[in-house]
Amino acid sequence: MDPVRDIQIIDTELCLADIDTINNRMKKVEKLLKAHDKKAAAEQALLERVAKGLEDIVPARRMEFTEEEEAALYDLHLLTRKPIIYVCNVAEEEAADASGNPHVKAVQEFAAQEHAEVVVISAKVEAEIAELPEEEAKEYLEMEGLTEAGLNRLIKAGFKLLGLQTYLTAGEIESRAWTINIGTKAPQAAGKIHTDFEKGFIKAEIVSYDDLVKCGSKVAAREKGLVRLEGKDYVMQDGDVVEFRFNV
């Protein structure tokens, strides 16, 4: 067993796929050069540099680019430019603490070179809790020394990697989670539900999820001064429970 070798094999395959993409783009750039396109020479130099790195099995995510170069590469959708999360599957007894596992340590050291996150889970534990009712699953996790399921931790890591967060709307008919980019302001968050909400935005009535759960109801949270009104410049926070006020 050698997880780092496995990673390198996958990286090699992805680098080879990206080389094909670069070569195809290079053919078009050569035509642009013949047509005296002013930007073609700079793009050709960039593509040649990226191709050289890929040939040396250096994924594009490990290469450094200027903002202008980033923009030039964007439409190529290079596979090795994609952000990475490494997931280590360990034995059931290591689900809560895999610090003594040399394979996990090797992956963590490898991931640190590209500032990637490593999530450690036990597929066996995940399979067990997937078949249990919620309360029994919670008890099983506690018995294993875990505070939450590995799948939940993986989802959170994925959201963090992609710069995403969640806000909630809750009513008598339904409760829903809405995915937005970190840094989104209240009107734009309202627009995720309906464009009219953004156009006619007035205020957002907000309480944090944790406060709402602790208080037991929105009424109780309001009595404790935990419900607040926010305006157009409010930057949404992960776990906000929101009721938007707007004019149609």
Image: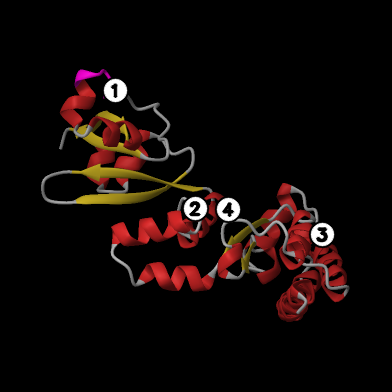
Q: Secondary structure at mark 2?
A: helix
Position of the N terminus by quadrant? bottom right
As drawn, is 190 to the left or to the right of 150? left
Q: Residue furthest left?
A: 172
User: Label 4 belongs to which residue?
Assistant: 161
Residue at 39% from the left image edge and 67% from the top image edge: 129
Q: Determine contact: label 1, label 2, CB under 8 Å.
A: no
Q: Earlier in the sequence, mark 1 or mark 3?
A: 3
Q: Secondary structure at mark 1?
A: loop
Magenta span: 223-228
Q: What number is the disc on residue 226? A: 1
Q: Secondary structure at mark 4?
A: helix
User: Label 2 belongs to which residue?
Assistant: 156
Mark 1 and mark 3: Cα distance apart in space: 55 Å
Nearer-the-camera pick, 112 or 37: 112
Q: Quadrant of residue 38?
A: bottom right
Mark 1 and mark 4: Cα distance apart in space: 30 Å
Q: Position of residue 227 (x, y in %)?
A: 26, 24
Asked if residue 226 lies in the magenta stretch, the reply is yes
